Image (cartoon, grey):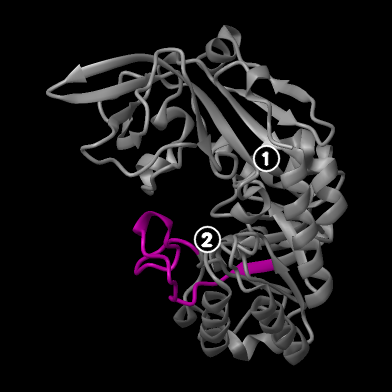
Amino acid sequence: MAIDFSKITSSAYVVEEALLRKNLELIQAVQERAGVKVILALKGFAMWRLFPMVGQYLAGATASSLHEARLIAEEMGKKAHTYAVAYRPHEFQEILQYSSHITFNSLSQFECYKGQARAAGASIGLRVNPGYSEVEVALYNPAADGSRLGEAPANLAGGLPLEVEGLHLHTLCESSAEAFEHLVAAFEAKFGQFIPQLQWVNFGGGHLMTRKGYDIDRLVAALVRFREKYQVEVYLEPGSAIAWETGVLVATVLDIVDNHNIKTAILDVSFTAHMPDTLEMPYRPRITGAVPPNEHIHNYRMGGTSCLAGDFMEVYGFEQPLQIGQQLIFEDMIHYTTVKTTMFNGVHHPDLCLWTEDQQLQVLRRFDYQDYKNRMN
């Protein structure tokens, strides 16, 4: 049964519990078939009230900061697989308390902290960069020339330190099973000589296995081949796949502005504050009921509520004219959206809601003036 939007006060992010569970069941099946472990990347989905549910299906979670590692420990009850581009010295001992695995971005970071990590009993990893990616948007390509993310093959010409138990790499973004096969081939070509000394390999994120049409069988086969060939533990840490198409952002039309024959529907949400990837990546969000614009229908820009001049999306078409007070639904607005919101301009922050499997609305968090004020304090 679909969400009853009449029960929702705009603006609000709404996660459908049944759809989230469906994704988790699919991912659990991949784990079991391939004999690998899939862990949640908090950078893609961090609604911690749902961590107990996520923890029923996944093997754990990955963190990139002290706060993420602590949140995983406190709300999922598991130690984190922690990787950071660089660790802050005064935080490292506390990070170790919450982490089963510690991955370093560079050999210099490894040399700096390896003693503390070994003393804490953490499994030590090193991020490597095979220089290969099929990601076309530069902002999201971790393998671009000059990337700061991971050691290049040339930097390991002297060998891999014996204390390193695992290698971590991440070069995909909402990619296919075929792209994963290509990544494995690039990894083997650049770093294959080190794999026999490893206990684990983490292939990072970007494995969009919950997208319709994704070739699950091909992914499973590639994972099984690699795991059986090298006899290592294999981890995946998808960000988008967990919450892919599990919820929406509910908005309302506050005004309609007509300027130079361009009509703009002013909404009670902001693209820069509440959907930043639509401007950064960029990608065009889907709106329920909208169609490609043409001269025979009603066309509107979507305008955000902040004062940023570029806080808008170009024209959408509608069969009927929009009305002030009308509700609009932005689809697939949970992954990499709820985690990146800001309170820029003091604009109203959408509620965080759950539409439960028994058709009830739970408001998990409602933001107010004190939330904004405390961020500035």
**Tag 1 and tag 2, C-beta contact below 8 Å:** no
C-alpha gap between disc 1 and disc 2: 18 Å
State the residue at coordinates (60%, 65%): 207
Query: Is 60 inside the magenta-drawn segment?
Result: no
Give the structural element (helix, strand or loop) at label 1: loop
Query: Does residue 321 appear in this view?
Result: yes
Range covered by the magenta-colored residues = 125-149
Q: Residues within 10 Å of mark 1 (few under 14, many from 20)?
A: many
Given the image, on which type of amino acid does mark 2 rest?
A: Glu
Camera-near label (1 vs 2) is 2
Query: Does residue 158 appear in this view?
Result: no
State the residue at coordinates (43%, 57%): 140
Q: Which residue is mark 1?
A: 46
Residue 341 falls left or right of residue 63 = left
State the residue at coordinates (84%, 61%): 121
Question: Image quarter for residue 120?
Answer: bottom right
Residue 58 falls left or right of residue 309 = right
Residue 61 versus residue 17: which sits nearer the camera?
Answer: 17
Q: Relative to 312, say whether 34 is above or below.
A: below
Residue furthest toward the left?
260
Question: Image quarter for residue 276?
Answer: top left
Residue 234 falls left or right of residue 265 = right
Residue 15 versus residue 144: which sits nearer the camera?
Answer: 15
Q: Relative to 323, say whether 122 is above or below.
A: below
- Provide residue 213's location: percent of width, then percent of height: 58, 67
Residue furthest toward the top?
369
